[in-house]
Image (cartoon, rainbow, N blue to C red):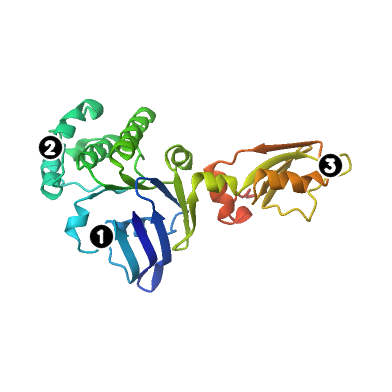
Amino acid sequence: MIEIRDLVKRFDGFAALSGATLTVPAGSVYGLVGPNGAGKSTLIRHLTGIFRQDAGTVRIGGEDVWENPGLKARVADIPDDWYYFSQAAIRDMMRFYRGFYPSFSMERYEALKEVFRIDEKRPIRRLSKGMQKQAAFWLALCCMPEYLILDEPVDGLDPVMRRQVWSLVLGDVAQRDTTVLVSSHNLRELEDVCDHVGIMDHGKVLLERSLAQLQDNMVKLQVVFPDGVTEVPADLPVLHASKIGRIHTLIMRMGAKEAEELLAVYQPLLVDAVPLTLEEIFIYELGGADYAVRDIVL
């Protein structure tokens, strides 16, 4: 389990994290989402031991992360900007990783050659961005980590390789009970792989729930009201409303059954509940119209 409690981090008086609290259940895939500047990467750098917190606790498997080399040997991460030695090839970095990870598997390293198909003797700096990201996954997965922390992990990968990489990661979750925390702006992709989601903004985790709970707690309805009712009744607790022709689309923070019971009073001609995407949940949990796309007239 990954546990962060009341985490505070300031840079020159600016609070990048202001009391963030987060729990990642063991053996789960946890998606950390939020707008740019929310504090996601800063939080991740505490989990990997790069930053030391000003206040609060950062624990993995019940142990404090800061200056804990034994724990770090069980944690692998792939940052958005992956580091490698400027003249190194993949095989050079493999030797480097083996020195830090006692559980590094050469058997897996050899097996994954058939997956990634990259010349292991070619300097990494001469590889494309996508191939460098493949190399990062190749090495990280060979560390056989108990905890895998990913920051924009599949950025730059083509669709086929994205699917391949997620298959390998989810295979480790299923077979080795690996705990994965992934930060990404690709919410559609997270929706396919995550079972828990945390939403960050302004240095705090606003909420964290299982994906199923998030989807059950908010509903999107397409509604056609009877003749004469052209606007959404003011007493309905609507987060967001839009209209095309006679069809009103309503976002409401409640279950579908409860929303349909509220609407029944107005005898609508049509009520159809539509599943919300993680992207829609993200937008409306963060403040609805304040985060919606704006039309600018020039």
Residue 203 picture location, percent across and down: 44, 63
Q: Amino acid at mark 2?
A: Arg
> The residue under label 3 is which amino acid type?
Gln
**Which residue sits furthest bottom?**
13
Q: Which mark is residue 49?
A: 1
Q: Secondary structure at mark 1?
A: loop
- Residue occupying image coordinates x 23% and y 42%: 140
Q: Nearer the viewer, residue 124 or 203?
A: 203
Q: Position of residue 83 (x, y in %)?
A: 22, 48
Residue lying farthest right?
A: 228
Image quarter of residue 107: top left
Q: Which residue is identified by label 3? A: 267
* Mark nearer the viewer, 2 or 3: 3
Q: Quadrant of residue 189?
A: top left
Asked if the residue under mark 1 is in contact with the one under mark 3, i.e. CB atoms within 8 Å, the reply is: no
| Residue 248 in picture, x, y percent from top left | 74, 41
Q: CA distance from mark 2 to mark 1?
A: 25 Å
> Which residue is more in the foreground, 177 or 198?
177
Residue under pointer 2: 91
The residue drawn where x is 61% and y is 53% is: 288
